[in-house]
Image (cartoon, grey):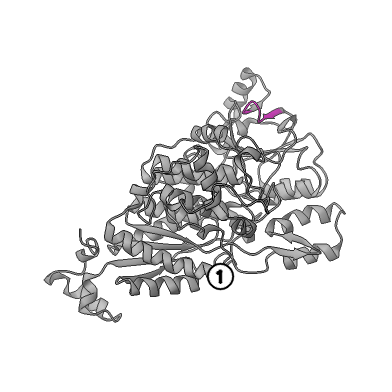
Amino acid sequence: MDANERSKHITEGVERSPNRAMYYAMGYTKQDFSNPMIGIANGHSTITPCNSGLQKLADVAIAATKAAGANPQVFGTPTISDGMSMGTEGMKYSLISREVIADCIETCVQGQWMDGCVVIGGCDKNMPGGMIALARTNVPGIYVYGGTIKPGKWKGNDLTIVSAFEAVGQFTAGKMSAEDFEGIERNSCPSTGSCGGMYTANTMSSSFEALGMSLLYSSTMANPDEEKVRSAEESARVLVQAVRNNLKPRDIITRKSIENAVAVIMATGGSTNAVLHYLAIAHAADVDWQIDDYERMRKKVPVICNLKPSGKYVATDLHAAGGIPQVMKILLNAGLLHGDCITITGKTMAEELAHVPDQPRADQDVIMPIEKAIYAQGHLAILKGNLSPEGCVAKITGLKNPVITGPARVFDDEPSAMSAILADKIQAGDVLVLRYLGPKGAPGMPEMLAPTSALIGKGLGESVGLITDGRFSGGTWGMVVGHVAPEAVVGGTIALVQEGDSITIDAHKLLIQLNVSDDELERRRKAWAPPAPKYTCGVLAKFAKLASSASRGAVTD
């Protein structure tokens, strides 16, 4: 098969003379038309520090593509800063940006008959958006993560963006001085790169190494460091070779490789958002992967990394300790990783990991040996019950007792819940219900980092439950349950909860239950009516019409 098998549809033949004329306008030569066309999907923007350091990676990917005898074709992809839009109407566009990014890449790759694609991204939705596109198009592709931010420092303590969110609760509770509040604000984000803990960006990038779609060690490099540039350069070279070898995403993204990705997510204590995103990636790749598969993986994969938000360290610490390859080698030796999965290099995962030590270094406590696991089982639990018969997601690490039964405090939007928390109207033992925030209901399924961080800042992280049909940031921890499905706007049970109702969250029993009789629920259901759509035109209206349940990944196709 020719390396330009796709692009020759628009470059070869008499009838394609006008096409070639347009290429000549951009400096192409006649000889270039026999070379593969490689898309460089560049997520660079100055919207967010997560993406503001990507141009240098795109530049070296362009140069490496040319040097490898291929033609780079650069196009842009958008991004939304979750950290900046959090707690505002803008956050409704965050999950939607995953679909927009996927659609952008698919449109360019398919519309221009590209032979391969290097996807470069930074903020949270860049990763699943790019991977969904590669899985959809099944055109040879590689993911280049922009890299993590370096940790901030204030009075000897490491900071991440979550430090600033939690400081809001501490400051309003009178537990923090104005000096420390401003010091944390000014120093939480000291460089370019994505949020530093094992939050969503680092979770997804780490899992892409395990999936086989990114180069080893690339996910934990810091954006400002030269090694990140070198890794991007090598990624482009590897991708051109994959094009020549006709190695496609669906050769790599299989049920077994998704199991590898989820094993790493569990082992590192990764983000709840990974549940949603891998359901969507599997859907795009036509792989059978269901929400119950996460619970199956949780039961057999321990948490072996001590990483924020519930642990101590950040991604740069993980990198120094051996990175994701060290984590994978431990899992491989324990029989928890499929070593026969092919990777983008053309080698199997076992071959890629052959050089990695069997055990982590003794002089660090970021990555633990399997026999000294921090938690014996994974941290992302799938709960079911009458409140969520389709299943919802709880992050249960870091909690002394992930069980609570308490009175419901019901809010139909995030701002009113936030106001109640900051005004000290929420007490230990309460269970907050934040609803009409699902894929269709918000629409866009915004993250609840502001209220969960405020609860932690108020000292209520372990004693107050919070359930929502929305999402959580990867930086969230505490007694929180998200992705409740069916969501409120389609008549899910969460829509029927009333103030003061008793709710049970029991992670041990994998139970989320509204303690109200079936007869009473049926009475409430008959009296319930769906609210009018919040948006009638534009992107949000489209998403509300198209989005599936969170239990299916909130996909739009």
User: Around disc 1, counting alpha carbons within 10 Å, would you say few (fewer than 14), some (14 to 19), or many (20 or more)?
Assistant: many
Q: Position of residue 540 (x, y in %)?
A: 50, 52
Q: Position of residue 132 (x, y in %)?
A: 42, 51
- SS of the residue under disc 1: loop
Q: Is residue 552 above or below residue 416?
A: above
User: Residue 507: within the magenta?
Assistant: yes
**Viewer-proximal residue, 269 or 326?**
326
- Counting labels gives 1
The residue range painted magenta reads 503-511
**Viewer-proximal residue, 32 or 20?**
32
Q: Give the residue type that dot 1 points to.
A: Ser
Q: Position of residue 556 (x, y in %)?
A: 43, 46
From the viewer's perspective, is 504 left or right of 440? right
Q: Quadrant of the C terminus?
A: top left
Residue at figure coordinates x 47%, y 49% from the top left = 210
Q: Is residue 376 above or below residue 363?
A: above
Q: Is residue 468 visible?
A: no
